[in-house]
Image: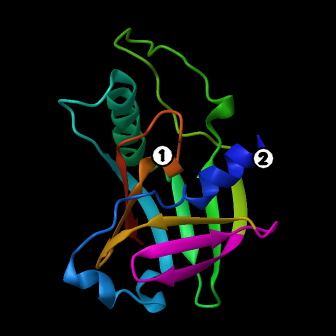
Amino acid sequence: MMKRTTILYLFAFFFVFSCSTDKGDDLLNEDSIVGTWKFTQLNIDNASSPNEIRLANDVIEVLTASGCEILVFEFKSDNTVTAVAKDFTETGRDVNPEGNGLLIECPTNVETSSSTWELDGDQLTFIDENAMEETITIKLDGDTLTIPAEVVNEDNLEGAEAIFTRK
């Protein structure tokens, strides 16, 4: 459970992408990522994505449209990062009273974790309190941060991208 939580926060935290050849990547610096980043959407290929990923995308769209902050990272200039994630383990699976599908509510419980971070080009490394490192490839375009979604949920989101927007 602790490993899953750590992975979720690490990011959760920034998903493993293939290296980019964009010239903009060498413009990334640590100041580029400082700020608060809110998970806003899942980028998937609807035609080839498994049903589980399409369902996860539908749930994420409903929750973010209702203002639910599923996952938020705060990257600070002292190279610490705090992740605040909704805890979906206690979320009910109720049916809407109207009988038109599942009732999707934003969880009230949250999990918070902290670690340090380093940015080298498009490689973002998280270092947890046990000195365990995880490096992912990110895409950063102004106020949009893209990471591999399996960092958020390695079991259900492989092949998708998680999109974060600076608050």
* Crowd rating for badge 2 (residues with CA inside 10 Å; few <14, some 14–19, many 20+): few
Q: Amino acid at mark 2?
A: Met
Is residue 4 shown above or below 36?
A: above
Q: What's the residue at 35%, 36% (across, down)?
A: 57
Q: Is residue 118 left or right of residue 167?
A: right
The foreground one among 96 and 147 is 147
Q: What's the residue at 28%, 31% (across, down)?
A: 49
Q: Is residue 110 visible?
A: no
Q: What's the residue at 41%, 54% (across, down)?
A: 148
Picture quadrant where residue 145 is located: bottom left
Q: Amino acid at mark 1?
A: Glu
Quarter placement of the C terminus: bottom left
Is residue 56 shown above or below 118?
A: above
Which residue has dot 2 on it? Answer: 2
Which residue is the extreme one toward the left? Answer: 47
Which residue is the extreme one toward the right? Answer: 130
Q: Is residue 32 visible?
A: yes
Q: Is residue 161 left or right of residue 157?
A: left
Quarter placement of the N terminus: top right
Looking at the rendering, the stretch of residues picked out in magenta corresponds to 115-131
Q: Find residue 37 and report its horizontal and vertical position in percent.
A: 46, 69
Mark 1 to mark 2: distance in Å? 17 Å
The numbered disc on residue 150 is 1
Picture quadrant where residue 58 is located: top left
Q: What's the residue at 73%, 65% (across, down)?
A: 132
Is residue 119 shown above or below 127?
A: below
